[in-house]
Image (cartoon, grey):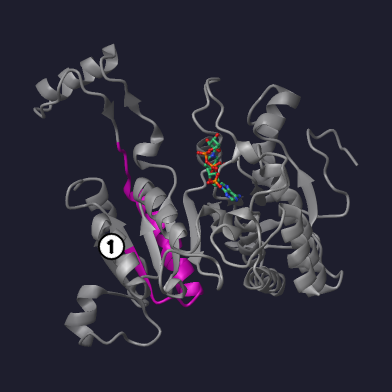
Amino acid sequence: MSTGEPYEIPTDGEPIRWEHNAFQVPDHPIIPFIEGDGTGPDIWRATVRAVDAAVAHAYSGRRGIAWMEVLAGEKAYKRTGQWLPEATLEAARRYRISIKGPLTTPVGGGIRSLNVTLRQELDLYACVRPIRYIAGVPSPMREAEKVDMVVFRENTEDVYTGIEWQAGSEDARRLAAFITEELKKPVSPDAGIGVKPMTRRGSQRLVRAAIEYALHNRRRSVTLMHKGNIMKFTEGAFREWGYELAREEYADRVVTEDELWERYDGKMPAGRLLLKDRIADIMFQQVLLRPTEYDVIATPNLNGDYISDGLAAQVGGVGMAPGANMSDGIAMFEATHGTAPKYADLDKVNPSSLMLSAVMMLQHMGWNEAADALYAAMAAAIQQKTVTYDLARLMTDATEVKTSEFADAVIRQLG
Ligand code: NAP
């Protein structure tokens, strides 16, 4: 089994390859998984059973996943003394598609966040979050079924680069003095200071990924969500660079809102994608008031963080929200909530976020039959009101089940 690697490589699988700008997936791909901390092992155990059952149901043994555990978080720290061993990063690079549960953010120890480190080390520049309503899930919306959006959040730039100085520190004071005296922009000497770097390359590769996704999946529009009216050279530049990219690379496939009225009298030409932009604050109103007008959303890091969770709430909260972090050639699918440590090992929490992320993963692999089967089985279990505590407390007449029992219910639906 072991070949001297720091993880055990399954002998019954092969690596996924990246060729001609696409994943080449063998029938028995090796897929690394990180089970995660806190409630991670509970939701992972449930998810892996449901995924294997969906794949078996769809392909009758012709295809199957060779799972390979790799370590991160508390389990890694206990076994190796490192929170994020290099071998784990190497496995994500080498095997290309992986999946993870939530990870504790270590307090102290020099790592700000394992998730942010993973994204930066692997240059996973797009955080992709589909937000789609499953009938029966309790939602604060009257017509939650109208919500069907996919957020592409830039993952590597913006205020998340963590370049900041504490108020009162020597560096903050020096920087305030430099900005005030040399750059002639007054900054109070007692200010805390953060930096928001954003580049044309970083913005355009994110917008490109969103446009490619929208074209490939026949979505209607991509909206650039920004706060460019205030932050002109960062968020405003994101908007400009987005339109520039569309002009340079997608002129024959994308129509901007201005062009729609100037050239097409407001009627969208067939087969084209609409590119528009909205200021972030109004966007938060519009996704609530007129959700059908929004489809794919491309946005810088901080806006993306807020809008992803805001939209997730509209369809039932983070317990139901899937996600992935991607670059060209590496994709890591993940539960979008945290480790919910107070419920660890209680077999209690909702595994749907990780299961829906596995649905995304199967779609990404081109295993659409298994993805559709798993999604339909989850939807059927939820419609029958067989749900975990978080949904049960918001529903009438629900049967509250444990994490593992929800997986059982999904597997029963697969027949
Ligand atoms: P959290 O773990 O997401 O939990 C907050 C609350 O959300 C829980 O108490 C629970 O609410 C609900 N919840 C979360 N997951 C759920 C699930 N699967 N099913 C049902 N309900 C769920 O957030 P946190 O307590 O702020 O963070 C805990 C740790 O997770 C921290 O170390 C944080 O850094 C880390 N974290 C990791 C990730 C990641 O790995 N992607 C993301 C966020 C946070 P109720 O108690 O009200 O039922």
In terms of image quadrants, where is residue 382? bottom right
Few, some or many residues within 10 Å of mark 1 (<14, 14–19, 20+): few
Image height of 378 relative to 267, above or below: above
**In x, y percent, where is residue 163?**
35, 29
Q: Residue furthest top?
A: 170
For the point 25% across and 15% down, the residue is 168
User: Label 1 belongs to which residue?
Assistant: 285
Q: Let me know if residue 371 is in the magenta part.
A: no
**In x, y percent, where is residue 47?**
72, 55
Image height of 120 relative to 401, above or below: above
Image height of 169 relative to 52, above or below: above
Q: Pick the residue in front: 411 or 10.
A: 411
In terms of image quadrants, where is residue 190? top left
For the point 67% across and 68% down, the residue is 378
Q: Pick the residue in front: 395 or 37.
A: 395
Q: Quadrant of the N terminus?
A: top right
In terms of image quadrants, where is residue 63? bottom right
Would you say the beta carbon of the disc 1 residue lies within 8 angstroms of ligand 1?
A: no
Magenta segment boundaries in residue numbering: 196-223
